[in-house]
Image (cartoon, rainbow, N blue to C red):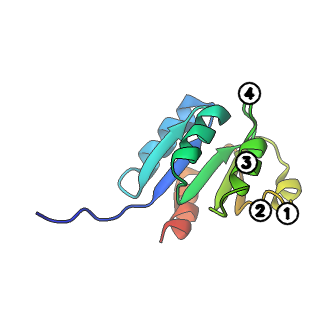
Amino acid sequence: MEAMKYQKTVLVVDDDENILNLLEICLSGTCIIKKAKNGKEALKILNEKTPDLVLLDLMMPNISGKDVCKELRKKSDVPIIFLSAKDQRDEFIRDPVLRISEYISKPFDPVDLVHRISGYLN
């Protein structure tokens, strides 16, 4: 029996079900995908096991992406890519507490996003 190839895990956090499904389709076959529809679900998943990469929507109800990021940074330096409809790239990219890897504005090109993600998974 052939041993399973190790695949890296990506946590995708977004309150938009269409974006979660799109990213799941785009990333299928390249990594293990965990999905969370809000910050609370994301924190639960992150408490179980830290993924290799986090795609994190900035604006979510209740617990924002920024707050999820702050909690994650207390225990991990995992790469985080913010996804947001707001154009506040400079504000977040330079924040020394958040230490995000990239900031991608919505709407985004799925092919470009997958290409950028692949650099973190190799």
Foreground residue among 41 and 101: 41
Q: Assign the N terminus to one quadrant of the image.
A: bottom left
Q: Which residue is mark 4?
A: 61
Work out how far the residue at label 3 is from the one at label 2, CA to CA, in angstroms: 12 Å
Amino acid marked by disc 3: Glu
Foreground residue among 46 and 95: 46
Whichever of labels 4 and 1 marks the residue nearer the N terminus, that label is 4
Residue 5 left/right relative to 56: left
Amino acid marked by disc 2: Arg
Amino acid marked by disc 1: Pro
Whichever of labels 1 and 3 marks the residue nearer the N terminus, that label is 3
Q: Are marks 3 and 4 in contact (CB under 8 Å)?
A: no
Q: Which residue is mark 2?
A: 99
Foreground residue among 8 and 87: 8
Q: Position of residue 15 (x, y in %)?
A: 63, 31
Q: Which mark is residue 13?
A: none
Label 1: which secondary element: loop
Work out how far the residue at label 2 is from the one at label 1, CA to CA, in angstroms: 5 Å
Q: Position of residue 51 (x, y in %)?
A: 53, 55
Tell me which residue sits at (58%, 45%) in the image: 47
Q: Position of residue 38 (x, y in %)?
A: 63, 32
Amino acid marked by disc 4: Pro
Q: Which residue is mark 1?
A: 96
Quarter of image, res 7:
bottom left
Residue 79 left/right relative to 28: right
